[in-house]
Amino acid sequence: MLRSAVLATASAWVLVPQASLAQSSAQSGAQNLPSVTVTAPEARRRAPAAAVRSAPRRSVQTVNRSKPQPQRNAGFVETARGPVNGYVGKRSSSGTKTDTPIMETPQSVSVIGAEQIRDQKPNKLDEVLRYTAGVRAGTFGADTRNDWWLIRGFKSDDVGLFLDGMQLFYTSYASWKLQPFNMERVEVLRGPSAVLYGGSSPSGIVNVISKMPPAEPIRYVETGVNNFGNAYVGFDVGGPVATQPQDGKLFYRVVGQVQNGPTQVNFTPDNNYFIAPSVTWKPDADTTFTVLASASKQDTRGINFLPYVGTVTNASYGKIPTSFFGGDPSVDKFTREQEMLGYQFERHLTDDLTFRQNARFAHIDLTYRGYVGNDANQATATLNRYNWYAKNTANQADLDNQLEYRFNTGPVRHTMLFGVDLKGYQIDDYQAFGFGVPSISIFNPVYGGAETPLPTTPFRNFLITQKQAGTYLQDQMKLGNFTLVLSGRNDWVETTQDARDTGASVDSRNDSRFSGRAGLIYNFDNDIAPYVSYSTSYNPIIGLNAQNKLFLPETGKQAEIGVKVAPKGFDGYFTVSAFDLVRQNVATTLPGSVPVLQNQTGEVTSRGIELEAVANATKELKLIGAFTAYHLFNSKDLDPTLVGKTPTNTPEMLVSGWADYTFKDGPLEGFGFGGGVRYIGSSWADTANTLEVPAVVLGDLALHYEWQNWRTALNVINLTDKIYVASCASATSCFYGDRRRVTASVSYKW
């Protein structure tokens, strides 16, 4: 009965009519950081006199002091959803769904704040992650369509993307795109997280925290252009709104950006438009209600699928130019229109009891059309191509209810969280594919011929719906220097696949699974904190295998040990973690399949070590360092020759470091410079591990100057203009990395 009721509610939630919101969006562009003032929290409303206990005043105060209380300190206090001080984020909600110090979280967590985003000037979300331990960002190189990343060796951008604690998963081509210009912080939680979030990547999640309405006015504009001629202008304005005292307090924010222009690949623009308004209402000191909306639009073209011979190694004709466009500008297009509307509600019912409810409805409409590369003819130096079309429309709805209760049992302090969440997802998936497209000369391409018609029978033509309901319970128990975290969750999932043309039900499945986590961390008085954790995950994949049958749910398990160090008097921390992660029912690509088809072939294991250091070393110097090494291999497979082999696209070593120095005094006051080095290890282009994609070392540079309210900056990625292949999914699907990109920007705040 419970299962039927919650799934019925989820069904109603996902089938909300598709709102036709205003469609306007922008691309992730580099942002500058307007100053944000965090005001002292308001005093709590006093309880009625009749409700006050008759215990002595000193006794009551002593008892209350011994209980874990919400953060209500005066001055700047970091919160899990607020600004980060420099590069060092010390609190996070991603690992526990409560505002918890990272040093008391028995799991690997990284926080990237708005100041680091500003200094490095990423063009999209995966570039934000480039200097984060355990993350291979930009798997497919200079692709303008999507954000791609691996966590601990596993693809996680499809089911591991979260916005403000709620999932934005995708299947087929209906991917979401978020803008760095509207990010207050980005948190990376490594390891299984299904116990709190339901279906998600067993390797971890990326949780983007939106910019929220500020307590003090913000007025900020920025513009810039790069060496390819791609230009942008963005704005960020907000602050308090005058209200009558009896109406509470009202704050607003509007963030927007327009980006337009070419990229390193001919006929491939990167045009983005977005706007993100938000409003916060605080009727009293105990209640906060925030509404967040966004609308965005992207216009670009598909990525080149190029052969291994001709990119990684020389063909008889040499190397394919990085600027080569393998489609046809009169045919190819990739457009995404995306809208979101949601809210965050928080109410402190008492000093010890807090209720939160977060909700969001998101809609996406995506069209992908083009001629896609399919190996090359070396004798004629031409690229073979096939015909492709995908039309995806998807809705996703999330509703998360949380009740947080803080209490004591003897010497043990508890922060208990009980939650019920609902997810609904529906995708209208139409795909057509065919051969018959003329090949194109690599060095003398001719475009604009007669368009090759698509087959009248689609490759896929389905309506897939998934409804998921979950309930979870977590207890963070603190005894002296020990913190024990115990979490458990059960999910009920219903997935159906219907034929779009007839409406007939093609396939369906019902699943139920428990996920759990146990973690223990000990904070020594010298600020060294060793920890150990074990967790399981459950991910009901939305998608179809090569036989057009629904995927089986994916499961995972991980054991992790580590040490976190935050020396006294030093604004920073160091972490070391070792893990053993197993992912089961993994979807892998069938070799040589055109278009790409997948089956769930067995099990993949990732074992490795991660080191990360983040510091505001002095008031002038900020530092980041990361080292990742793991062994990723097929531990089970239907093909015994693949057992022990490493999946394609996956480097097994990543090393990076970044530093930024800004003069605070003297004649150079306001001038700063920064730079970083990234090492991306070698990977494989084939499942048999015979075709190697070489390792690469890349350098980045930043110069900036602030004077009064102005800031100018020059950012360079791939400083030496290294030509390299970011990865290969197969011998016929290789992807060039970013060439040198120089971005000049200027901003003004008032």
Image (cartoon, rainbow, N blue to C red):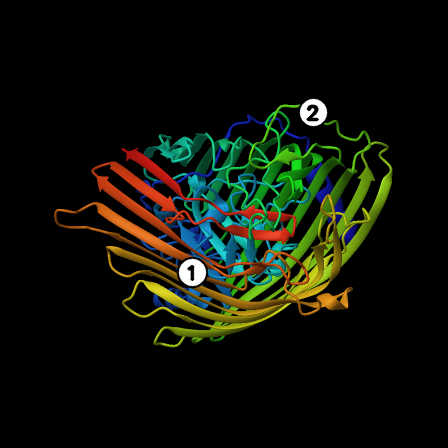
At horizontal 22% and vertical 46% (from top left) the residue drawn is: 671
Q: Which mark is residue 69?
A: 1
Q: Amino acid at mark 2?
A: Glu
- Give the position of the C terminus as an image quadrant: top left
Q: Amino acid at mark 1?
A: Gln
Image position, residue 585 (x, y; %): 73, 60
Asked whether residue 353 appears in the rendered view, the answer is no
Image position, residue 194 (x, y; %): 63, 59
- Quick one: 246 or 382, which is closer to the camera? 382
At horizontal 31% and vertical 35% (from top left) the residue drawn is: 747
- Above or below residue 628? Residue 396 is above
Kindly identify which residue carries mark 2: 451
Horizontal side of residue 688 vs 30, given as left or right: right
User: Which element carries disc 2, helix, strand or loop?
Assistant: loop
Horizontal side of residue 540 vs 337, given as left or right: right
Residue 606: image quadrant is bottom right
Image position, residue 131 (x, y; %): 43, 56
Mark 2 Cα shell of 10 Å, populated few (<14), some (14-19), many (≥20): few
Image position, residue 578 (x, y; %): 52, 72
